[in-house]
Every structure is written in structure tokens, then in C-alpha cells.
Image (tube, grey):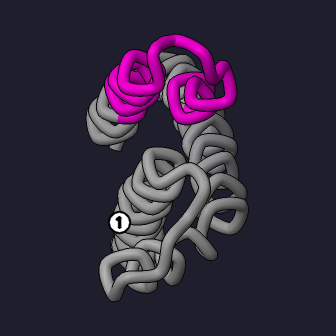
Amino acid sequence: MARLTISFGIVLILLGLFSFMATGAHAPTSLIPAFAGLLLVIFGFLARTDDVKKRMLHMHIAVTIGLLGFLGTAKALVDFVRMKQGVQFARPVAVEEKAAMAALLLVYVVLCVRSFIAARRARA
């Protein structure tokens, strides 16, 4: 799971950097996915330990970051669908970026929860 966390973190960093460049480097808020991705990368590396308790702690922190990130951007998924149906938004790049972040973090959280459930069943 640590590799998956690092991978999702790198993708979020790239998303933030590409969006920042797409805005002409005028919108520092477009770097929010990069900051979330950086946190995932850090906790992913911390989870690469042989100590089971520390690994569990770091992965649970990473999933909590992912869940909070998803909850903070989930509305953008609806806005993205509305934008594709023709509704105009003042900052369409922001809507697309938040929707991409929400989708990525939702997939990440679901994969982690499935892994946690499988690990608990394997211990039982």
C-alpha cells in the first residue's frame, strides 16, 4: 500500500503543477493537489517500514488525508458534470482540477479501505 500511496501522491503533485502552469502561474490555489500529494508521498515513504504498528499508523494518516481531500473537493464532480452540460463557470480549469483531484482521491481511499479490510481478515 505504501507504493500505491506514493504513486497517487506523485500523480497529485503532477496534477497541481500542470494546473498551476495552465493558469499561467497566477493561481497559487491550483497547487493544492500538489500539497496533498506531497503529504501522501511523505506518509507513503514513512509507511515503508518493518514495524507493523508504525506502518499502520502512517497508512491510516495517509488515508485520512485522502478522505479529507476527497470530501473537500467532492462537489467539483457535480460541477464538472454540469460544466459538460453547458453551464458556465468563472474558472473552468479550477473545476476540472478539483474534479480530477476528487476522483483520484476517491479511488485511492476505496483501494486503501479494501486493503485494510483484507489485512484485517487475514489476521483473523
Q: State the image coordinates of residue 98 (x, y, percent, origin top left).
A: 52, 54
Residue bounds of the magenta highlight: 12-36
Left or right for 8, reference 43: left
Of helix, strand and loop, which one carries label 1? helix
Q: State the image coordinates of residue 56 (x, y, percent, origin top left).
A: 58, 44
**Quick check: is 17 in the magenta stretch?**
yes
Left or right for 51, reference 57: left
Mark 1 closeness class: few <14, some 14–19, many ≥20 residues within 10 Å: few
State whether residue 119 appears in this view: no
- Seen in the picture, residue 56 relative to 70 is either above or below; the reply is above
Hey, which quadrant is residue 12 in on the image? top left
Q: Nearer the viewer, residue 26 or 102?
A: 26
Hey, which quadrant is residue 29 in on the image? top right
Q: State the image coordinates of residue 78 (x, y, percent, origin top left).
A: 51, 83
Left or right for 88, reference 54: left
The residue lying at 45 percent from left, 62 percent from top is: 99
The residue lying at 47 percent from left, 25 percent from top is: 23
The residue lying at 45 percent from left, 67 percent from top is: 106
Kind of residue at disc 1: Val
Q: State the image coordinates of residue 59 (x, y, percent, origin top left).
A: 55, 43
- Seen in the picture, residue 13 relative to 79 is either above or below; the reply is above
Q: Which residue is mark 1?
A: 107
**Quick check: is 52 in the magenta stretch?**
no
State whether residue 114 appears in this view: yes
Q: Quadrant of the N terminus?
A: top left
Left or right for 24, reference 114: right
Tell me how many marks there are: 1
